[in-house]
Amino acid sequence: MEIIATATKVLEEKFKEEGFEDCFIVEIESLPGKKLNVFLDCDSGLSLRKCQVISRHLEAYIDEFVWKDTKYTLEVSSPGIQRPLKILRQYTKNIGREVKVKMIEAPEEKGTLVAADEEGITLRQKIVRKEGKKKIRERVETKFPFTKIKNTVVQISFNKKK
């Protein structure tokens, strides 16, 4: 069985256990030289402790059933803030946060993620339009289909809102 399919199966079984039900796989990469990168997330946030337990569980399985007596590298972590969102569950988890959306054939969009479904996302954006000599500022909600989106990255802000 291919290592990605095996890792997926082992992790999905682990996610049925108490305390891990809100965890999910974002991406698994199998790289040359027997290197496996596993990116996970949890609806409640992936703690270091939870990540360690999952990593050890997967490592024990690989040691016993997959790459016995073989040197390999296993890295289990959250995707991190710099990696684009990959799956719908990540989008729904990040509703209410600021995102930057790179479009396939249009300018980049920024706004607050307010909804996500199988077809796309909805952003709340601040726009400025002119009416004569007046500038009118308003908030609009715009739906963007996934078919038009290249990638979406959550924006981290260190400014406190008042």
Image (tube, helix red, strand yellow):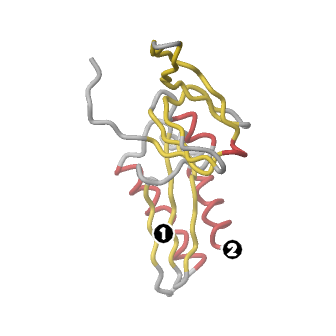
Percent from the top left, x then y, of residue 48?
34, 51
Circle 2 residue: 2
Name the residue located 46 percent from the left edge and 85 percent from the top edge: 71
Front tag of 1 and 2: 2
Image quarter where the C terminus lies is top left
Q: Indicate the secondary structure of the residue bearing disc 2.
A: loop
Q: Residue 38, which numbered label?
A: none
Q: In which quarter of the image is residue 144?
A: top right
User: How far apart are the two marked residues, 1 and 2, measured between alpha carbons?
Assistant: 16 Å
Give the amino acid type for the residue marked by disc 1 in the picture. Answer: Glu
Circle 1 residue: 59
Q: Quadrant of residue 5?
A: bottom right
Image quarter where the N terminus lies is bottom right
107 on left or right of 59:
right
Q: Quadrant of residue 16?
A: top right
**103 above or below 2?**
above
